[in-house]
Image: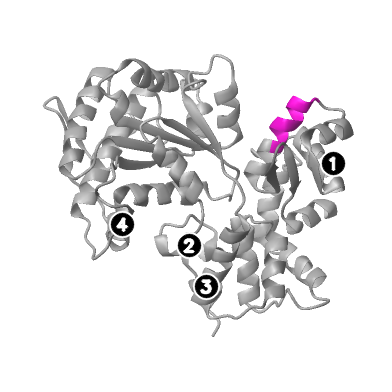
């Protein structure tokens, strides 16, 4: 029985996964963040690598998928692309507004288990007034971007909110800031991150109770590495990566079981080869298999690659990664050159690529990190990398 692609969840697996039953992998990443939840964690990865899905998994894990005996901070997911703060005072306002909103939605959520309660939490729409201590009230209906909080009001509201999170069974709070490039590209970025650093460095009362996860791509990576950056030395930087073989098998098994299709080992191997362990590419290849293209059969792989490369979603995604016109946040000229050099060898250490491209080892190492964080190559350890998705490699060859 084949599932109609029009009714597949998450927009045909093109958008973030918000249901734990459909999420696989990322255990090491989630454990690393949870182990230092009260710190500043920077999560980096390219388009479609699964950052938002991982952030949502972090959210539902903190909300209740672990035993209550384990210390849990209360998570507050914020998409900065959606909120679009206009300055530091407005940014502080958004942090408190979303914290209070999330607390209210969690208090109203219901379910027989933590998964059902999390799904209820996502469906809730808050419309109550949010009291910030005894100083001010904020209405959540149609909030205006001009609303601001100075430091004293923000701190008062945060301390007050932390007492309410304890009543809900949590200790502390973690602000999960998705699409953080929005702030980095603003002239007030240093003010915002300096303020965060000040909270973590000098506010001894709040320091152990407030954590941040800042997610983004190369703009965030470059900002955190810049000399004088307020995030330098206080943030733990974690790059996303492709799936391991076991995680990839889990994804394919989950999809094929849910859609009632049977595939053999040859097809499973072909899916892994074409995707290179990239979760988004794997999802789209499985869509193709489920909809009738038997890519593992002898003599059909070249035809399947040609079919896949005509699909608009993959073609657009690959073009954004390759960024030949330098109009996206994808690869720069050096990264394109280094990818081609690695493709010629298929597997190499960074020093070998440096010799092939006449670029410094440091420049090559940085570029390989970006390429791996986008998911088009795989990091094997000890400065060694290999080509990842054969589908993307073929797209590059044709372009």
**How many residues crowd mark 3 within 10 Å: few (<14), some (14–19), many (20+)?**
few
Q: Is residue 25 above or below residue 383?
A: below
For mark 2, what is the residue?
10
Q: N-terminal of the two: label 3 or label 4? A: 3
Which residue is farthest left?
134
Q: N-terminal of the two: label 2 or label 4? A: 2
Q: N-terminal of the two: label 3 or label 1? A: 3
Viewer can see residue 296: yes
The Cα–Cα distance between marks 2 and 4, rounded to whole angstroms, is: 16 Å
Question: Which residue appears at 15% of the width and 42% of the height?
Answer: 167
* Boundaries of the magenta span: 360-368
- Describe residue 178's horizontal placement relative to residue 165 as left or right: right
Q: N-terminal of the two: label 1 or label 2? A: 2
- Describe residue 253's horizontal placement relative to residue 266 as left or right: left
The Cα–Cα distance between marks 3 and 1, rounded to whole angstroms, is: 40 Å
Label 1 element class: helix
For mark 1, what is the residue?
341
Q: N-terminal of the two: label 1 or label 4? A: 4
Viewer can see residue 126: no
Question: Which residue appears at 74% of the width and 43% of the height?
Answer: 385
Check if residue 76 falls in the magenta segment. no
The Cα–Cα distance between marks 3 and 4, rounded to whole angstroms, is: 25 Å
**How many residues crowd mark 2 within 10 Å: few (<14), some (14–19), many (20+)?**
few
| Image spot of residue 153 (x, y percent) | 22, 22
Look at discs 2 and 4 and give the one toward the viewer. Answer: 4
Look at discs 2 and 3 and give the one toward the viewer. Answer: 2
| Image spot of residue 349 (x, y percent) | 78, 38
| Image spot of residue 80 (x, y percent) | 43, 37
Label 2 element class: helix
The Cα–Cα distance between marks 2 and 3, rounded to whole angstroms, is: 10 Å
Magenta span: predominant SS is helix
Dots 2 and 3: beta carbons under 8 Å? Answer: no
């Amino acid at each position: 029985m084949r599932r109609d692609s029009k009714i597949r969840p998450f927009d045909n697996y093109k958008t973030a996964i918000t249901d734990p039953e459909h999420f696989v992998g990322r255990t090491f990443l989630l454990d690393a963040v949870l182990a230092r939840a009260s710190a500043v964690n920077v999560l980096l990865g390219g388009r479609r690598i699964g950052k938002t899905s991982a952030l949502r998994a972090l959210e539902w894990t903190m909300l209740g998928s672990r035993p209550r005996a384990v210390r849990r901070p209360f998570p507050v997911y914020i998409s900065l692309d959606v909120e679009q703060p206009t300055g530091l005072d407005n940014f502080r306002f958004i942090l408190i507004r979303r914290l209070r909103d999330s607390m209210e939605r969690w208090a109203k959520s219901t379910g027989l288990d933590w998964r059902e309660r999390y799904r209820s939490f996502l469906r809730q729409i808050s419309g109550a007034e949010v009291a910030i201590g005894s100083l001010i009230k904020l209405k959540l209906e149609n909030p205006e971007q001009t609303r601001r909080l100075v430091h004293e009001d923000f701190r008062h509201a945060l301390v007050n909110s932390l007492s309410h999170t304890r009543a809900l069974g949590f200790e502390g709070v973690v602000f999960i800031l998705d699409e953080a490039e929005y702030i980095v590209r603003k002239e007030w970025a240093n003010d915002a991150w300096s303020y965060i650093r000040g909270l973590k460095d000098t506010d001894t009362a709040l320091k152990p109770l407030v954590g941040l996860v800042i997610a983004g791509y190369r703009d965030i990576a470059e900002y955190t590495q810049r000399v004088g950056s307020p995030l330098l030395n206080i943030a733990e930087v974690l790059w996303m990566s492709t799936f391991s073989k076991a995680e990839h098998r889990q994804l394919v098994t989950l999809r094929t079981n849910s859609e009632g299709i049977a595939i053999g080992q040859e097809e499973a191997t072909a899916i892994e080869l074409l995707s290179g362990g990239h979760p988004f590419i794997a999802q789209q290849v499985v869509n193709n298999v489920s909809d009738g293209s038997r890519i593992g059969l002898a003599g059909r792989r070249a035809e399947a690659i040609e079919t896949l490369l005509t699909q608009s979603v993959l073609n657009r995604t690959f073009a954004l990664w390759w960024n030949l016109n330098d109009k996206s946040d994808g690869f720069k000229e050096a990264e394109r050159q280094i990818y081609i050099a690695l493709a010629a060898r298929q597997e190499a250490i960074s020093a070998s690529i440096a010799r092939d491209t006449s670029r410094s080892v440091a420049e090559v190492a940085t570029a390989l990190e970006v390429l791996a964080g986008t998911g088009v190559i795989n990091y094997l350890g000890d400065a060694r990398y290999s080509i990842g998705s054969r589908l993307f490699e073929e797209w590059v060859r044709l372009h």
